[in-house]
Structures are given as structure tokens and as C-alpha cells.
Amino acid sequence: MNYQEKIATIEAKIKNKEFNSAEQDLLQIINDEKIKNVEDDKYIYYSFYNYIETLIYWRKYNPSKKILQPENNIADVYYLLGFINFETKNYGNAIQYLDKAIEWNPVNSRIRLEKADALRNIGEIERYRIEIEKTYPYIYESSYMAKYYCELGWYYSEKKIFDLANALYTQSVSFLNTDLAKNELMYIAQEEHREPRFSTKEEISKLFKEYNIPFGISNEIIQFIYEDSQNLLKENKVQLANYLYRALYDITLDKRFMLYVDLKDEKTKIIVKIPEIWRTLNKEAYGKFGISDNTLFLFITPQNENISVVCDGKCDAGQLDVAYKLNIENMKKQGATIEGEYSIIGQKNIKQVFVLVKQNEKNVRIYQNYLVVNGYLINVSWEVPSDIPIEQIIEIENNSFKGQFIWSLKGENEDTSSQDIMNEINSRLNELLAQGMSTQEAMEIIFGNNPVFREIKEEFNNNGITPKVISALENLSNQIIKDVTQDPYWYDVSRDIFKLLILSNLLENKEFTLPDLVEQTNNVEFVKNIITKNLDKFNIPELPKNTNVKSILNTDKPLKSIVEIIHKSILPYERTELQKQGRKEMQEKENVKSNAIMVKCPVCNTEFKLNWNVPASEKTFYCKCPNCNAEIKKVNPNYKG
């Protein structure tokens, strides 16, 4: 019997509370283990649970010895021994076993949290808090981040610091909504003689700063996982990179890291792209739940939302308005209330309607989206809150995974390359705005249109290296490489190397662009060689001001750190060239349309032509900007109420 089979048998015994037998089996594994010590002269024998734990240890500690994984997961064996003794209230033994588990795996959060619980049960409250805090640098899963805040919430609740405890339980719920956290929020409310409530973001931020509690997953951990995912993609190790992307989405909820699955309905040949975290109801189960046979797909989100994709029969693009109106009239006859109607006209023509229906004596609001796909009329719908203004809902829903999903609907042989590029532009814009950039800053990055860099190139191409170029370089370096208070010297040095790197590129290639830097700064040797080759041409007192360039270029570790700073700072420009291509393609498509009106986007100020085919019966409609994909609400000047 191999190790996995043994552990499966032991875990079954633990589940059945056969603790004595399970403990004897675990001790036998320890006795039979050939490797008795964590470290010898050549190797370290850590028992990590997965790739991410190995990655975290390597990045944090950069060990000089090679790590070998024992055949048996020794840390797991000791953890299970600790768990058994915890369950049988032998807390002293539990702590000893869990300490051994930590010795064999120093980066696993679950082991440390189990030890903390044992300390709490013997009344060692301060040691309990310290052990909880020790877990933070190693947390890489949302569930353990939730438990971290929950455990600290218990500690501060015991200390009667209820405002902080309430904030901690609120933060825990934001990572994982558990009954435990909600019950503790109710307990705090009773103690303070008030109704239960969640703390506000402002309250959480203020209290966490005051008590030195970290906010969210460590940026270091996110950076470790992200950088390794990018390296794996470059090495074409897609499966392992996807594993890291799943971890990144779990801890950040950043849409960049969502993985998608393509599905096809064989009858209509319609293809959809859904987030892989959605579940699909098997069509064989439709009859059991009273679902129409016309339903092509029924998806269930992690929030238990149902998204239905229904085929209402054959229909070509020119028949959309008539078919949509027929559906509206039929719903009215059945007693439904039409609350609002909207249209999107552009890459896809979509009719959107909010319908209020009675279900079990309760008003339910359904958001429906009608469009023609592959010669069929398709209705994508889901339930939305009925107590929120429609204008708010449409903005939220259209920018959600559900809204994006509608745009993925296509025929089997339909070319959607331009649309895919536009979706990427929109995703990139949202990502940069979320980082705190203004719309103008984000659009400059997306479309490779940094005005300072443009000024540098223009002046250099006309007059060479002039004081104007040096001044603009100073502005650009300050703009891209932000100040960091912990170590300002190295960031100043990085700016000087950044300036020399740009000048070296301009000397060798006048068509050099900022995205080129992203690739170059992945290679320290390239940066070193190109600057060294051109260094003697920079006979300018103002550049650099405070860097002994030759000594920096000849020292490996400082240069590597500097190039990493530059790379991280310039990284937002990574996809600019693709996005510029997308912008060009879409502008070309818009320019050939006839009978169009001009629309100016309020987000990016781009003017574009729009086909004018909104019926006079509609007061307002929505369209999408081809540059930034922003939703634009327009009043229909031909409206006849």
C-alpha cells in the first residue's frame, strides 16, 4: 500500500472517530520513514503540499541547499497526529506534533492555525494571537485569509475591543461568507446593544492601521505567484501557469486571472465562453426542474445565480426588432411589467429589457438580453435585485462576468477577432482604473500614447540629446518609477539607469517604443550590454546625477535589482501594441459604415460613427465605444412617445 492509500485509510478512520487506530497507523509511518531529520549536509527534506508552497519558500528564503521531497509527506503525518490529539483534547501533545509538522513544512497556514487553536484551548491567549500573526506571510488562499481574520476577531472580541473585532469579522466575510463570522457579528451587536452590521471600508482601514493588521493577502505572495505564472507561460508550461492563475483569481478576484471554458450547442452550432468557476446544469435534468426544452444552456455562478440561454427560433439580424417586440407583447399579455428598455448598437446589436414578474406572490426582476447569433434569436437572462435603480444595475451587470459572457456568444464559424481585441482593451482599461489611474493615464498606456515619451522621441530625432530631452527624460522617469519611501536611493538609481536605457535604444533604433522595454528588462544582460556599448556617447553632465554607472553595470546583484524595479514599473505597457492594433482595426471598420451619426465617448473623448437604426418608439439606447468599450447612454432624437 503506497502513502496516498495509507493516508486515505487513516483519514477515513479519523472521520469515523477511530482515533486510536488512526494514531497508531500514523506513528507507524513515522517509525518506518527512512529520513529522520529535516536537513543533512547536502539536502533539505521539506514536505510541501503543493507547488505554491515550494515557490513561496524558495522566493522568501533562497536556500543554498537543494530541497528534496520525501516519499511520505512527513509534515502531513505530524499534522494529522496533532489534529487527532486536538480532537481528543490532548492539547499539549497536539502542540508538540504540530511543532514537528511546522519543522517539516514551515510555510503551511493550516498547520499554524491548528496550533493556534490548540494554544487557545489551553488558555494561552497571547501565544494564540502571536501564532495567528505568524501565518500571514504564507497565506495564499482566500479561505485561510478568512480564517486568519476570524481568529483575530475572536482574540479582540475576548479583549472587549469590539469595534476592531467587528471590522475583522467583516473582512473575514469579504473573503469567505461563513456562519461563524456572521454569528460572531451578532454576538458583538448584542454586547454593544445594537443591530448587527458590517464595518465600513473606512472603519476597517482606520482600525487596521491603528492596530497594525495587514489588509488582504500579502502583496509579496501575490507578486511571487504572478511573476512565476508569467515565466511559466513563456516556457509554454500552460497547465502549471493556469494552476497559478486560479490561485491568483481566488485571492485577488482580478478578472485578468479568470480562466474560461468554451461550450457548444450542437443543434444551433452556437459557442459560448464561460468562466470556469460557473457550473452547467446537464440538459437531462431540465425536465426534472421544469426548464424549457428551448434552453441551450443553464449556468450557475458561485453566488447561486442562474443564467439561462434560450433559443426563441430562427431569426436573421434584420428581424431582431420585430422578434423582440413580439416577445415583449407576449410577456405583457402574461401579466409582466416592462420596467425599462435599452439597446446596444455596434459590434453586436442587443435589446435589453427589465421585466417585473410575480413568482410565489413576490415581485422578481429579470434582466433579459436579446440578440441574433448564428441565425437564431437568443435570450440571455438572469434575476437581478428589484430594490436598486435600473441605471445602477445595468452598469454593474454589463461589466460583470455575466455581461461579458453575452459578448462571447458566436456562431461556430464566426470571426470575432476584432471583438476579442476590443474586449481585451476594455479589460485592460478596467484593470488600470482599479489601480487608481485616471482615465486619461489609463488610455495613454493602453494606446501607447505617452505624451512625454513622444516629446523625447521627437526632440531626439530632430536634434539629438539636448537639454530638452534630458528634462523630458527626468519627467518620464519620475512618472513611471514612483517614489518608495523605504529605499529611495535605489529608486533614484533605477531612474538614472532607466534614462540611459531609453537613450541607448533611441541611439540604436529610432522606432523604439515603451513596450520594447518590457521585453528588454526581462534580460539583465541585454540591459547591461546595450548601456555599456553606448555609455561613452553620453557626455552630458546632467545625466546621470548621482549614479556611478560603470560600477553598477559591473555588479550583478544591484543591477539585477535595479532592472527588476524598472521592469515592474514599465509592465503596464506590456500589451500596448496589441491594443493599438485593435484600435486601428475597429476604426477602419467604423469608417466604412454609411448612414451613420457621430458619437463622442465621454470616457476617452474618441469620436466614432454609429449606424442609426434605433426605432422611434425607444426613448434612449446604449452603444459601445470602439476604443475603450465604455457603455454610452444616448437620447433618441427621433423618439415619439
Image (cartoon, grey):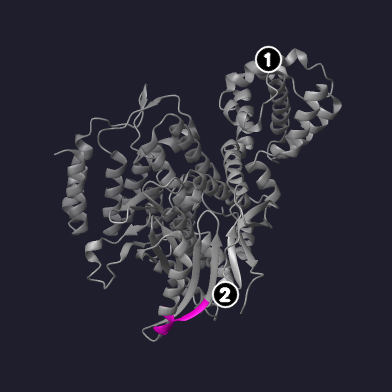
Indicate the position of residue 195 as horizontal and vertical percent values: 53, 80
Mark 2 vs mark 1: give the one in front. Answer: 2
Is 511 drawn above or below residue 597 in the view shown? above
At 34% across and 43% down in the image, what residue appears?
101
Distance in Å between CA atoms under marks 2 and 1: 69 Å
Name the residue furthest left: 1
Residue 201 in view here: yes
Most foreground residue, 574 or 585: 585
Give the quadrant of residue 479.
top right
Is 139 drawn above or below residue 460 in the view shown? below
Residue identifier under label 2: 617
For the N terminus, the image quarter is top left
Q: How many marks?
A: 2
Residue bounds of the magenta highlight:
331-339
2 or 1: tag closer to the N-terminus: 1
Is 438 drawn above or below residue 182 in the view shown? above
Residue identifier under label 1: 532
State left or right for residue 273 relative to residue 515: left
At 30% across and 50% down in the image, what residue appears?
82
At 28% across and 56% down in the image, what residue appears?
267
Indicate the position of residue 98 as horizontal and vertical percent values: 34, 47
Name the residue furthest bottom: 361
Name the residue furthest front: 595
Most foreground residue, 164 or 410: 410
Amino acid at dot 1: Thr
At 80% across and 33% down in the image, what residue appears?
472
Most foreground residue, 467 or 495: 467
Residue 429 among magenta residues: no
Amino acid at dot 2: Ser
